[in-house]
Image (cartoon, grey):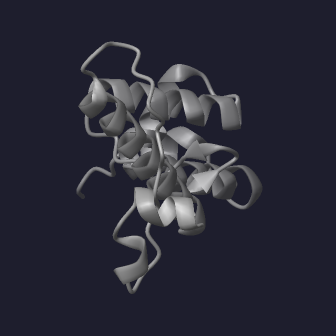
């Protein structure tokens, strides 16, 4: 621990745990110290955010089901997650995601449709006409 304290001078003064990553003296590219430190920082932040998402229950079966499908890439990823979980064709999985706005809600609604509701999927996803 003494070695780490000399490498990371804030450890002894912090009220909260500090992650100190010793990246070593070798550089792949001469003068790339900032790049090496930035890569280490990014890896630590990714581990923290991934752990947080797992603890918050945002991950189901190793997939981020509470993501916001805010662009075409994420929409397609969400549709494919629904397809994999339900065996629905692309069009039906896409309709579920469109109606419910998240993979989690789409999967929950599909569970209700399959196991509780006798109504076919198209009746539940088609907007009702005003009378």
Residue 127 sits above or below residue 33 on the image:
below
Residue 74 quadrant: top left
Which residue is at the front of the view, 3 or 116? 3
Q: Residue furthest bottom?
A: 15
Quarter containing the N terminus: bottom right
Residue 127 can be seen, yes or no: yes
Q: Residue furthest top?
A: 29
Q: Tell me where residue 80 appears, x and y as whole percent.
A: 54, 27
At a point 26% along the width and 39% down the height, the residue shown is 70
For this view, does 17 lie left or right of residue 9?
right
Q: Tell me where residue 97 appears, x and y as whole percent.
A: 43, 41
At a point 56% along the width and 67% down the height, the residue shown is 2
At a point 35% along the width and 82% down the height, the residue shown is 13
Residue 102 can be seen, yes or no: no
Q: Tell me where residue 33 appears, x and y as whole percent.
A: 29, 30
Q: Tell me where residue 86 appears, x and y as whole percent.
A: 69, 36
Which residue is at the front of the view, 102 or 92? 102
Quarter containing the C terminus: bottom left
For this view, does 109 lie left or right of residue 8?
right
């Amino acid at each position: 621990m003494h070695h780490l304290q000399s490498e990371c001078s804030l450890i002894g003064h912090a009220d909260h745990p500090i992650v100190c990553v010793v990246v070593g003296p070798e550089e792949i590219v001469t003068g790339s110290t900032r790049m090496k430190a930035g890569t280490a920082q990014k890896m630590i932040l990714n581990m923290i955010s991934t752990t947080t998402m797992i603890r918050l229950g945002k991950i189901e079966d190793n997939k981020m089901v509470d993501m916001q499908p805010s662009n075409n890439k994420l929409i397609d990823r969400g549709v494919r997650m629904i397809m994999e979980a339900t065996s629905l064709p692309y069009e039906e999985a896409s309709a579920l995601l469109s109606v419910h706005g998240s993979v989690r809600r789409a999967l929950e609604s599909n569970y209700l449709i399959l196991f509780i509701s006798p109504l076919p999927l198209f009746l539940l996803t088609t907007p009702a006409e005003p009378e």
